[in-house]
Image (spheres, coloured by chain):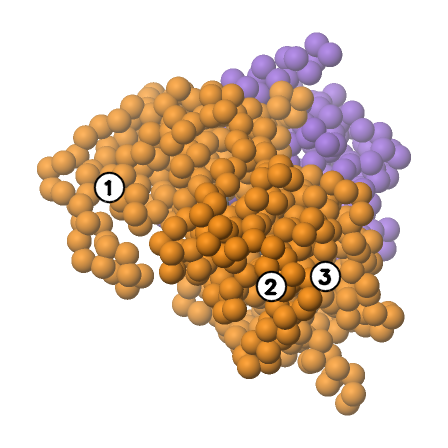
Chain colours: A purple, B orange
Amino acid sequence: MNVVVEKIFFSEKVAKLVIQAPEIARSRKAGHFVIVRVDKFGERIPLTIAGANIEKGTIDIIVQEVGVSSSKLCKLNAGDTILDVVGPLGKATHIEKVGTVIAAGGGVGIAPLFPIVEAFKKAGNRVITVLAARNKDLIILEDQMRQFSDEVIVMTDDGSSGKKGLVTQGIEEVIAREKVDLAVAIGPAVMMKFAALTTKKYDIPTLASLNTIMVDGTGMCGACRVSVGGETKFVCVDGPEFDAHKVNFDEMLFRLSAYQKQEVEAFQSFLNK
Amino acid sequence: MENLTTYLTQERDQEWRTEIRAKIKLKERTLKLRVKMNEVDPDIRNKNSVEVNSGLTVDQALLEAQRCVDCIDPTCITGCPVGINIPKFIKKIEIGDFLSAASVLKETNTLPAVCGRVCPQEKQCEAQCYYTLKLKKEPVAIGYLERFAADYEQNSGKMSIPEVEKSNNLKVAAIGSGPASLAWAADMAKFGYDVTVFEALHEIGGVLKYGIPEFRLPNTVVDVEIESLREMGVKFITNFIVGRTASFEDLRTQGFQAFFVASGAGLPRFMDIPGENYIGVFSSNEYLTRVNLMNAANPEYDTPVMSGKNVAVIGGGNTAMDAVRTAKRLGAETSRIIYRRSLNEMPARVEEVKHAMEEGIEFLNLNNPLEYYADENGRVNRMKVQKMELGEPDSSGRRSPVPIEGSEYFLDVDTVIVSVGVSPNPLIPACLSDLKVSKWGTIIVDKETMQSSIPDIFAGGDIVRGGATVILAMGDGRKAAAGMHQYIAEKVKK
Ligand SMILES: Cc1cc2nc3c(=O)[nH]c(=O)nc-3n(C[C@H](O)[C@H](O)[C@H](O)COP(=O)(O)OP(=O)(O)OC[C@H]3O[C@@H](n4cnc5c(N)ncnc54)[C@H](O)[C@@H]3O)c2cc1C
Ligand code: FES
């Protein structure tokens, strides 16, 4: 049982939970995730470890309310418990000094991007962070990002914060003015697809962190499989980060929609309860 | 070997055994017909998760026990991977002492209620029975009787908790909580160790919980055994992935003296044919895990599962049978097995194939999938299949399937479950660079002690054998316990 120590809302639908998980706090690195099952009836869902405090034995996860499981999590308060938390899972991000890094985060992808921005900065890179979302409310962690970025560019679809436009425009803007050695893109699959197409034009090596459907998170089921460079890979053990130029995002988009109908129905009945 | 023979003879010569043997004439015993297992009607059971076999009644068990002629040379025992003293437990049933029968089973088998249900008896003990070998008649129903005695004990409320030695305060750990680990834990607890079992998932039991369905092995049957291990002092820690949550080095620092790696063969194989990543194509592990571990078929639970109308399961093993029968139970109109060899080569337990046929599963044997197709939403809707014929025997001794040119045809499907085998779980080998593994990724161990190339690490079960069986996994667990006990004794002496 893992106790929720603290909850902070970043926006109406996005919350940070600080949970007691001392072993995971000690073992985790940037890029790792956990699988969480909120209660006996809950699904096993993957969530990136956005930060950790080894002394306090806690990890941070950031949850956006999109379906039943994420809503249940967002409803938890300090003192509540989460039934199962297991991790750290996945391969850690390979962090080294490469020069200039563009870190592009879209929507709830901003949360998993944060530990990576922090790690690249601490490794001595120049880090330019591009945050993008539909509107101002969905831009989260901006202040924290500024702490570890040389520059933060904010893009919103409606112009309610930063510049009006898409994440790709922000990326193009940076590439136009300076040499970029690496790009990291995390967000909805469509956003990563277009970010990858953009950087490919300029031959900039690009990593994407994939948020596929998962069950066990230990390589046991294959629910999380994607095609990368024509080969099938399991995101939970081979990833979650892959060469974005090789990922078949169209296939991934299809697979993400596998349970859409059931999910929408389940969410409706959950809201009506 | 000689010791064993002497021991078996001494046991057989005991007064109670001689007496019960003399009660019924040999001829009369062999004229009796093999008992039929009581089963739930196929048309009822294929719509829910009730256990298919309901077990034998007391009268049935007594009659079946009388069939066993208590041979001088009990060949059946040679067919049992853990060497259960089969005639002894059967004769205990014949005299009506069912609890003692269960204790006999437990001398060598930690999970008789499980093995009575899932062992391939027709290839093991029952294949070596006097009736099979000499009389060419149906063997004594050893599996049914094993289950009978074990269930009797479970239901009696008088579970015997094995005695454990005085604690020696030495900590040991197992990685994984499948049958290999449970068997190991029981022996280590008996030796007096402080035993911890780490499990990555949120449930204890490994494949017994996440893989084998309720209609074949009810969870409660496994839970009773886990409870008795708890009473023996075994600690279970779920949601803990050794090598991730903590490293072996961390655990050594915490005082663990030795480890038993029983992490299973969890990695599902696919066939690498076009269209395998369309929506609606699953591994059997995913399908079964959703239903068994996550309760996806129960609307109270949040995890979804696709319940297709036209389901094809690729493969012919126990896992394929479990998946296809699960699909039927979730409401499939057609659920088919597509298997590239013939019925004779099927690795599944004979009883499972029989049950599947009764339940209305179609078998397309000597057929092999070539490609899957999908609708505009990416959901699988059709597959291309090729017919096969049997050629020469391959290295496994089975006749290998050869494609028949020009025999391709199409089938409409909306769900495909790929069940063509599993590979060893790579998590542990990946985090121990000194660990010697085979080219298949299985951990290499000494066959007697189960010790790996790293002295304080032992291994057994599917991680050593590739996908095998519950009973072989348990046998490994017991060997590893003996090997580890000796290793620690020497280490502590130094
Ligand atoms: C659907 C299905 C049906 C089957 N039917 C039969 C049958 O009828 N008869 C039969 O004899 N056999 C059957 N088998 C095979 C049998 O179940 C296996 O051979 C047996 O369970 C292997 O036992 P094990 O202890 O080696 O591993 P498993 O039962 O696979 O258990 C391994 C456990 O280790 C855990 N683990 C892995 N890595 C770690 C880690 N790093 N840290 C912590 N935990 C970890 C896993 O989560 C898992 O729970 C079947 C298998 C399947 C999948
Ligand atoms: S989530 Fe099951 S294999 Fe990745």
Residue that appears at 59% across and 28% down: B50
The residue type indicated by label 3 comes to Ala
Tell me: residue A241, above or below residue B457: above
Q: Nearer the observer, disc 3 or disc 2?
A: 2
Label 2 CA crowd tier, 10 Å (few <14, some 14–19, many 20+) = some
Q: Which mark is residue A252?
A: none
Tell me: residue A81, above or below residue B262: above
SS under mark 3: helix
Question: Does label 3 or label 1 sit earlier along the sequence?
Answer: 3
Residue that appears at 65% across and 40% down: B58
- Determine the CA span between mark 2 and mark 1: 40 Å
Label 1 CA crowd tier, 10 Å (few <14, some 14–19, many 20+) = many
Left/right placement of residue B282 relative to residue B25 reads: left
Residue that appears at 66% across and 55% down: B92
| Residue pointed to by mark 2 | B85
Left/right placement of residue B103 relative to residue B59 reads: right
Read off the chain for label 2.
Answer: B
Is there CB contact under 8 Å for labels 2 and 1? Answer: no
Percent position (x, y) of residue B212? 55, 42
Displayed quadrant of residue A49: top right
SS under mark 1: loop
Percent position (x, y) of residue B38? 54, 33
| Residue pointed to by mark 3 | B186
The residue type indicated by label 1 comes to Leu
| Residue pointed to by mark 1 | B366
Question: Does label 2 or label 1 sit earlier along the sequence?
Answer: 2
- Determine the CA span between mark 3 and mark 2: 19 Å
